[in-house]
Amino acid sequence: MSIFAPRSIVAALFLAGLISTSQAQEPLKPTGILQAGFIVTAGVFNSELFAPYDVLEHSRYRDSDNYIACWVISQTGEELRTAEGIIVKPHHSFESAPRLDIVILPSGENSMEGDLANEAFITWIRKAIDDADWVMSLCDGAFPLAATGHLDGRVATTFPGDRERFAAAFPKIDVRFDLRFVVDGKFITSVGGAPSYEPAFWLVEHLYGVEHAQRTGQGLVVDWDADSIEHLVVDANK
């Protein structure tokens, strides 16, 4: 389910059920290589890192000139262990990271506590978010995103079991309890876990079109259909 604010005739037609989601949105079709950074800390959860990474990285198979280049970025760039025990060697530290078009904040064991207390971490992601065109959080990655202040006055969601805590910690955010992911401006927040593929597929479809996203879905053996997923688009970035 996709819901659009009636800010245009197209959106109003969609709300009236006269056109579909795919008709309501023309893909942006950016040219060139977009830089996507997955900002991780020790204890990052596998699903929130690897699922959206797969989807975005596979964009290079659709068009070798126009795609999303993915980087894993941590504060120091040193090896870290995921919550499930996989050793990850980031591509970049905060110091060496490129300017990012897309910032992705996967959930981790420290997303609701230690990461929020890490002033250098929050300061760096705040700046990266300022410069980015798109920002995506998976599961409790919404907590450090919210700590930057960028979600104030916006609609968002997070891991189902942590929504009440999220709403209490960040009362300026309109927290939704019934959706898999929410798009509000350039911010995409999601429930995480196995559905972590979904917000990444939505972004690929929004950028490059339905056929592009569905071909990636075929490669990953995922039947991608945004209309079958409970989500909310308050307003797309562009």
Image (tube, rainbow, N blue to C red):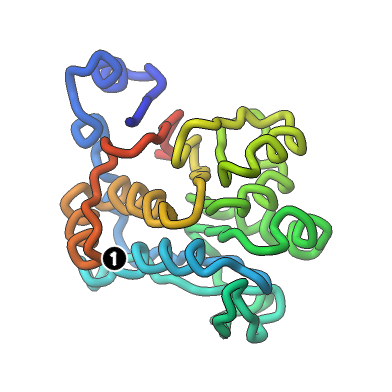
In the displayed structure, 16 sits above or below 131; it is above
* Amino acid marked by disc 1: Ser
Q: Quadrant of the N terminus?
A: top left
Judging by the rendered image, the residue that carries numbered circle 1 is: 59
| Residue located at (68% from left, 74% from top) | 42
Which secondary structure, mark 1?
helix
Residue 123 seen in this snapshot: no
153, above or below 71, in the image = above
Label 1 crowd (10 A; few <14 / some 14-19 / many >=20): many
Q: Pick whichever, 134 or 117, lies toward us.
A: 117
Question: Residue 112 vs residue 210: left or right?
Answer: right
Image coordinates for residue 172, horizontal then vertical, percent: 71, 29
Image location of residue 201, percent across then percent down = 33, 53
Q: Is residue 4 left or right of residue 191?
A: left
Figure check: 136 above or below 74 = above
Q: Quadrant of the C terminus?
A: top left
Residue at (68, 35) in percent of width and height: 164
Residue drawn at (48%, 50%) of the image: 134
Front residue of this view, candidates 27 and 165: 165
Whole-percent x, y for residue 221 in the image: 22, 63
Seen from the viewer's position, the closer of residues 16 and 238 is 16
- In the picture provided, is 218 more to the left or to the right than 25? left
Asked where in the image residue 83 lies, by quadrant, the reply is bottom right
